[in-house]
Image: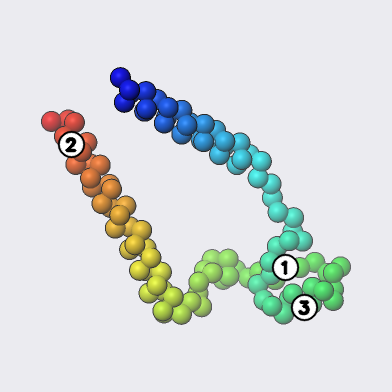
């Protein structure tokens, strides 16, 4: 009977965290445009000179692919980290499915 109570407490904690996360998500507001970053360092210099001029320095290719100029070593490192994440995740999914099949047999 004690084990069942542990699961109940854990699920109440998880539900509480979900509610807190939902409330925090509702409290997030849009960042004012004056705090937005610009695409080029040159635009930051002109920003201090011309504060009354509207700023629209982001280009379409920067929005679509922020890692377009990434070096091959960075891409290799990125691949290594994805493998570092996906291998334990796959192991967990496979073990979960194997344990679930035991329940249905």
Q: Which residue is mark 3?
A: 45
Q: Which residue is mark 2?
A: 101
Query: Which residue lies at the image location 23% right of the left edge and 45% below the top edge?
Result: 95
Quarter of the image with the C terminus in it: top left
Q: Is residue 104 above or below residue 96?
A: above
Residue closest to the far left: 105
Q: Are marks 2 and 3 in contact (CB under 8 Å)?
A: no
Quarter of the image with the N terminus in it: top left
Mark toward the start of the polypeptide (1 vs 2): 1
- Residue 72: x and y in percent read 41, 79
**Left or right for 99, reference 21:** left
- Of the residues tagged 1 and 2, which is closer to the observer? 2
Q: Which residue is mark 1?
A: 56
**Left or right for 9, reference 58:** left
Query: Which residue lies at the image location 23% right of the left edge and 41% below the top edge?
Result: 97
Viewer-closest of 44 and 16: 16
Q: Quadrant of residue 50?
A: bottom right
Counting the numbered discs, the total is 3
Marks 1/2: CA–CA distance: 56 Å
- Residue 80: x and y in percent read 35, 68
Marks 1/3: CA–CA distance: 14 Å
Query: Which residue lies at the image location 37% right of the left edge and 63% below the top edge?
Result: 82
- Residue 7: x and y in percent read 36, 28
């Amino acid at each position: 009977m004690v084990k069942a109570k542990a699961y109940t407490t854990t699920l109440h904690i998880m539900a509480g965290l979900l509610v807190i996360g939902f409330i925090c998500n509702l409290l997030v507001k849009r960042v004012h445009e004056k705090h937005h970053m610009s695409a080029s360092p040159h635009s930051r210099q002109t920003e201090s000179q011309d504060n009354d001029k509207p700023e629209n320095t982001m280009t379409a290719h920067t929005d679509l692919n922020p890692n377009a100029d990434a070096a091959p070593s960075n891409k290799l490192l990125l691949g290594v980290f994805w493998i570092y994440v996906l291998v334990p995740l796959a192991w967990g999914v496979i073990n979960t499915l194997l344990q679930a099949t035991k329940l249905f047999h």
